[in-house]
Amino acid sequence: MFAILVSGRLVQTEFQQISEQQCVTTIADADNINHIVVFLTGSVPFPEGTAGQVYFSWPDPHAPPNWQLLGYISNNKPSAIFKVSNLKRLHEMGDYSNMMFGQSHIVHNAQIGISIEPLANIQEVQAVDGADVQVNFAQKMLKSFMDFVLSYTITQGHMVPDPTATYVPLSTVQNWYTIFERRLAQHPNFWKS
């Protein structure tokens, strides 16, 4: 039903069924891979109203698998390309879902896991993840802006008068930052209106 493609390698269709709704495949020598394509082979569609959450487990020789959600595939979206080169290692992420797909032993190769779930649940997770991405971007952008502004701060005693320059008190910028961050936390899409 499923296949994966790693650049420079043959298509891989060998998935091991772990439960009625979950299966995994191993990707040997995963240290140099950047992207993975996961797709339906076309031989068997998903049952009506379901889709497959796609998870990735990066190799860590000192720990059991740590599953990270990449996205999903469905009958209407039968393939997806996932960037995996920027995923963090297990020791950087803490303890998250180490027992998914029935495994707790140490793995030296990367793995792809697919969990068949109701499509409505998957779409809900995707919508929440999309909002989280927007909030995360806005927070990082605001922090970058504040760090940039703060790098130019000087005391009044060190200021050289410049009649062509416009000055804004730092407290005004900090107040704007606080208000924007609070509004973002209350309603992530407020900036769209």
Image (cartoon, rainbow, N blue to C red):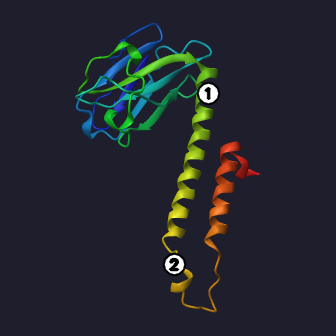
In what element is the residue under mark 2? loop
Look at 35% across and 38% down and name the residue there. Answer: 92
- The CA distance from mark 2 to mark 1 is 49 Å
Residue 84: % across, % down: 38, 38
Q: Quadrant of the N terminus?
A: top left
Residue 56: % across, % down: 39, 29
Examine the image and state in which quarter residue 49 appears.
Answer: top right
Which mark is first along the chain, 1 or 2?
Answer: 1
Where 144 sits versus 155, above or below? above
Single out the mark in the foreground, 2 or 1.
2
Residue 106: % across, % down: 25, 21
In what element is the residue under mark 1? helix
Count the numbered circles shown. Answer: 2
| Residue hosting label 1 | 123
Q: Amino acid at mark 2?
A: Ile
* Along the viewing direction, whichever of 162 and 67 lies nearer the viewer: 162
* Along the viewing direction, whichever of 52 and 142 lies nearer the viewer: 142
Residue 62: % across, % down: 23, 28
Look at 35% across and 16% down and name the residue there. Answer: 15
Look at 62% across and 40% down and name the residue there. Answer: 131
- Image mark for residue 102: none
Image position of 12 (left or right of 115): left
Where 183 sits versus 152, above or below? above
| Residue hosting label 2 | 154
Where 145 sits versus 107, above or below? below
Mark 2 closeness class: few <14, some 14–19, many ≥20 residues within 10 Å: few
Does any portion of residue 121 appear in the rendered image?
yes
Mark 1 closeness class: few <14, some 14–19, many ≥20 residues within 10 Å: some
